[in-house]
Image: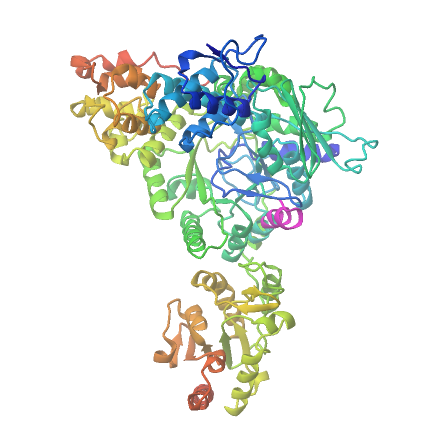
Amino acid sequence: MDEALLDKLETLADAAKYDASCASSGAKRRTGGPDGIGSTTGAGICHAYTPDGRCVSLLKILLTNYCLFDCAYCINRRSSNVRRARFSVEEVVRLTLGFYKRNCIEGLFLSSGIIRSPDYTMEQLMLVARTLRRDHGFAGYIHLKTIPEASPWLIEQAGLWADRLSINLELSSDRSLKAFAPEKDGTSIKAVMGQVGERILEAKEEKRRFSPAGQSTQMIVGADASTDLSVLETSDTLYRRYGLRRVYYSAFSPIPEASSALPVKPPPLQRENRLYQADWLLRYYGFTVEEIAAGGEGGMLDLGIDPKLAWALKNRERFPVDVNSADREMLLRVPGLGARAVDRIVEARRHTTLRLEDVARLSSGLKRARAFLIAADHHPGGLTDRADLRQRLVAPPKQLSLF
Amino acid sequence: MHRIELKDGADLDGFRRALRGLVALGLEPGEVDWSGGAAPSLFGDAAPLPADAPPVSLPRAVGDLIGTVVCHRDPERYALLHRLVWRVVRGERDMLDHHADPLVHRLALLDKAVRRDLHKMHAFLRFNEVRDPANSESGGAERYVAWFEPDHFIVEATAPFFVERFESLVWTILTPVGSLHWDRRSLTIGPAAVKPEHLDRDDRFAEGWQRYYESTFNPARVNPTAMRAEMPRKYWANLPEAAAIPRMIRSAPARVQAMIEAEAAAPHRRNPDKAVAAMARQEPATLAELNRIILAADPLVPGARQAVLGEGPEGAAIAIVGEQPGDQEDVEGRPFVGPAGQLLTRALEEAGIERSTAYLTNAVKHFKFVARGKRRLHQSPTAGEVKHYRWWLMKELSFVRPRLVVTLGATAALALTGRSVPVLRERGPTGFGDWGGFVTVHPSYLLRLPAGEGVEQAYRDFVSDLRWARGMVESAG
């Protein structure tokens, strides 16, 4: 690896880091065997963490950060003065294999600025994946960013080689997209999500390989005026209508060479965190968008407490619930109890009547849960309805960021 | 009191053997001392355990738990497992579902710690490439060495992961509690090792990784607590990239402040209007361009040797769409040259259509088959595959601009209409969007009919369909 390639790596990693997704999960178990290289384990592995607390699982780079688009929130928009570089297909392949053999990564997450045309760009991305798989027997994880404006056949070719395809919606409303990303079109993004979703289902039924780990997307939070309610409504639609595996939320972060069209201020990390928690409630805890939003005010989530506690505090008439008899759905709504803890409670109580110390062994969130739970030797009494319950449960709010 | 002595580290076999003996003798956990240590004789003052005790039948989950927990450093691990097994064999078969039971809880914590340790070793171990020309074993090929310090006795337990992932490489993993060596064929488990010096001295990729790690960090999101929760300090010594962490954290606030204070820079004066406008014209503009794309693309189902393109003049009055290339078409790279194709050519002639004046193509461009010995048996494309190729077919027809599209068989009719068409019931004239259409059978259907009078009639019907289609074109022209 020569100095010029190292420089490019720096530029094109820097240009790719605003994409929050880094998951390497969901692929079927597979190995490269004696002639290939690599394996996927299903769950994915984080090979390092950077001081921002984010996991480094895939080599996340752009093929190039030259771009014809002019999206205000993006560091690589054509009107930005950022330093530009471009990898060849072979260079990306070499870097991926080199880092993979040193056990630094699970695979590749490749995206790109739009050069020449969306089709040309998508084809280059597809060629990287194809070369890795076909010429090097690479069995590691490949996540390709899909260029929504590319022709359908190219997206389908990409799906033959990738484990996951993703298309970033970036902004939750069509109005914001029009204002900040003039070359993008919300309708065509969703059309491609629809196409990819349909193909994934078809391929599964017909036992063909097509993006087996599904598709995901990202929305930027805090760049435009969208409320949490509208962001979550969009997510809910994406999960239900397009069968997305994951929606990522990315707090809009100040970038070098920022556009004057958007706020330059520290990223709203706490808001991003609450959106992830709400997203989990949507997918695994049986909450609806309306219920989650009702826990906050004016379509925004309560930044001081997590959305499940916020909902519980506003619906205290449903508590306390008996840990020994309540159904799973209601236990999932108890603040402090996670889905795994609930499953273990349901299993354990078949054998014994649970006391508070038993629950303590099953869940690490008992401190918050005890005000909402009845156990064999415990009743919260008036605690559930105390006016200062919120204060008792929450340590004084602390901003996640350091400044 | 029975004193049992096991090997250092994770002695799964020794533990299993001892367990069988103890269960056979019906010894309670309270009567057994698992602490090992400097006992002169293997079993202290008690009678030796039977060497040929029968295996103990345990639920699978218990067996799995034993496998991980023996790797733990906790000196009490064997005693705790013995207590678990004691209760299981005495009737509590679903013991592990009692998540609130103090013993189960304690074992679950040990199990979790070992699993985490395994996971962190899979994650944080770094190989360095060593070039060792004197080493003949690897034939001068790439060789990789890693040093790692696990918390528990997990070195053997991690071997399957690394063998599976790096089966084609020669590598060595060194740790203070044992080592592994893989030569692309077999695994050697070796003794404890000491940390080698200057492992990454000659490895440019190690430097590349360092620079990647720093570049992928976003200073505006600095959150060292979250990082340390997943990557505690104890791992940093063996992670080359971790050397930069303190500096990255220290400089982050200033970097962000600079970004916030910087006035939005004047945008690049270059506004590539022409390039932006050209971007919209990316679709193939000619049939030849489209064909180049089709040739370069991979089959949806692997196997075919090549894509088989349509054949015939652009502007042909009749386009004939079949299903997909067969074995012979795949070999020759031309449509309708196999047995069904020859039958079609004959039928066209009898119907008064010169084959070379028509445009012949297939709904699906690649041959799909199952291999039976040397034979490649045709397999029909699925609806999803037809849809995948449809975009190309429609584009192709839009360049050819036929006056009439004749579909042969159900697949072609599906491709043109997007719905499944009962061909025998709907055969005859129809419309396919902008084009006039005609539905008929595929010649391979005629070839599959059982011999007899029906065959001749079916062939005559097919020819008369084609004649009818010719008539439609001529009357329209």
Q: How is the image coloured?
A: rainbow
Question: Can the viewer see residue A249 in this picture?
Answer: yes
Specify whether B99 is left or right of B268: left
In this view, the residue in front, B455 or A396, is: B455
Task: Name the quadrant containing residue B97.
Answer: top left
Figure check: A150 above or below B183: below
User: Please, is residue B375 above or below residue A277 in the view?
Assistant: below
Residue B438 appears left or right of B131: left
Q: Is residue B62 magenta?
A: no
Image coordinates of residue A95 in percent, x first then y, are 66, 37
Q: Residue at x 38, y 46 (%)?
A: A243
Q: Is residue A49 visible?
A: no
Magenta segment boundaries in residue numbering: A126-138
Most distant residue in the right direction: B134
Q: Is residue A137 magenta?
A: yes
A296 and A359: which is toward the camera: A359
